[in-house]
Image (cartoon, grey):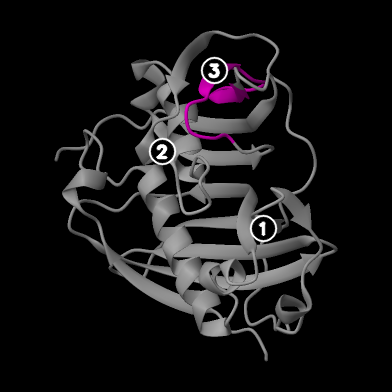
Amino acid sequence: MKSTGGITEFKIRSSEIDHKGRSTLPALVGYMQEAAWENTFDLGISMYELLERGLTWVLQRIRIEMFDYPRHGESIKVETWASGRERVFLHRDFRIYGSGGELLGQATSVWLVMDVVKRQLVSVPDFILAVEIVQGKEPLPFAKGKLPQLQETAFSQKMVVRWHDIDLNRHVTNTRYLQWVLDTLPTEILEQDLQEVDIIFRAECLLGDTVLSEAGPGDGAGVNLHKLSSEKAGKELVQAKTVWKSQGYDNL
């Protein structure tokens, strides 16, 4: 089978907006995942097909660029397609379009396959390799390389992993990690426009664990570096970089 991309339409709900009436980034990432799920379902390699074989998809990294944010009630389209494969790394790209067809944002992501019983990453199985990747769209540059390490912690908070933080894989869902990364920053940063996020998921975190979220300044104006760590396991869970720009306030 040859891979084909997919387009899914969503409408921004009131529970997914910020104080300016615009969609939050975690909500948009959730839409990207939903679009990816629908596309993989059409290709016969969705989460459910993997779970029947004792496997599952896990997101290893996602790099997002936002040019503008949709508002409450606006209909958007999320386009997604398989953009490449490197050893055990499977790449998937996204583009978000506004109601007028304008490009609001784009993202490139990296996915791995995990054994749900052993909780270990595995080689890409043959039934996934059988889906031939056909480049119908120009791929975005792959998310590669290291992120700068957080050197100076300016902000921190702790979160206990609760029931509603857990997803189908029985670990903390990646949109919750992203929310924790952002929520650690002070209001004066959060009121700015979030333009870029690069987030690497290094380890899973389970129900009942306590997560330490730390953030501090990076190199350049508006750049912040982030780290999430497991208090129980003593290991790094997430590393991220965010880029912010002040744009003033729009009227709702």
Type of residue at label 1?
A: Trp
| Among the two numbered marks 3 and 2 on one chain, the one whose residue lies closer to the N terminus | 2
**Mark 3 and mark 2: Cα distance apart in space:** 15 Å
Which comes before the other along the chain, label 1 or label 2?
1
Residue 234 or residue 189, whichever sits in front: 234
Q: Name the amino acid type tagged 2.
A: Asp
> In this figure, which residue is indicated by the disc labeled 2?
165
Q: Which is nearer the N-term, disc 3 or disc 1?
A: 1
Judged left or right of residue 248, residue 103 is right
The picture places residue 25, in percent across and down from the top left corner, at 40, 44
- Residue 120 in percent (x, y) is at 74, 49
Q: Which of marks 3 and 2 is in front?
A: 2
Query: Magenta segment: does it hold 122?
Result: no
As rendered, which of 166 and 63 lies closer to the eye? 166
Label of residue 23 in the image: none
Q: Which residue lies furthest to the bottom in this view?
A: 1
Residue 189 in the image: state x and y as whole percent.
41, 21
Where on the picture, by quarter, is residue 2? Answer: bottom right
Classify residue 184 as left or right of residue 197.
left
CB-based contact (under 8 Å), mark 3 and mark 2: no
- Where residue 248 sits in the image (x, y, percent)? 30, 29
Helix, strand or loop at mark 2: helix
Instruction: Answer few, some or many: residues within 10 Å of disc 2's Cα (few below 14, many 20 plus, some between 14 and 19).
Output: some
Marks 3/1: CA–CA distance: 25 Å
| Numbered tag placed on residue 111 in the rendering | 1
Mark 1 vs mark 2, CA separation in Å: 20 Å
Q: What residue type is labelled 3?
A: Leu
Q: Are marks 3 and 1 in contact (CB under 8 Å)?
A: no
Residue 212 image label? 3
- SS class of the residue under badge 3? strand
Q: What stretch is highlighted in magenta?
A: 205-229
Please tell me which residue is depicted at 50% across the width and 11% down the height of the picture. Answer: 155
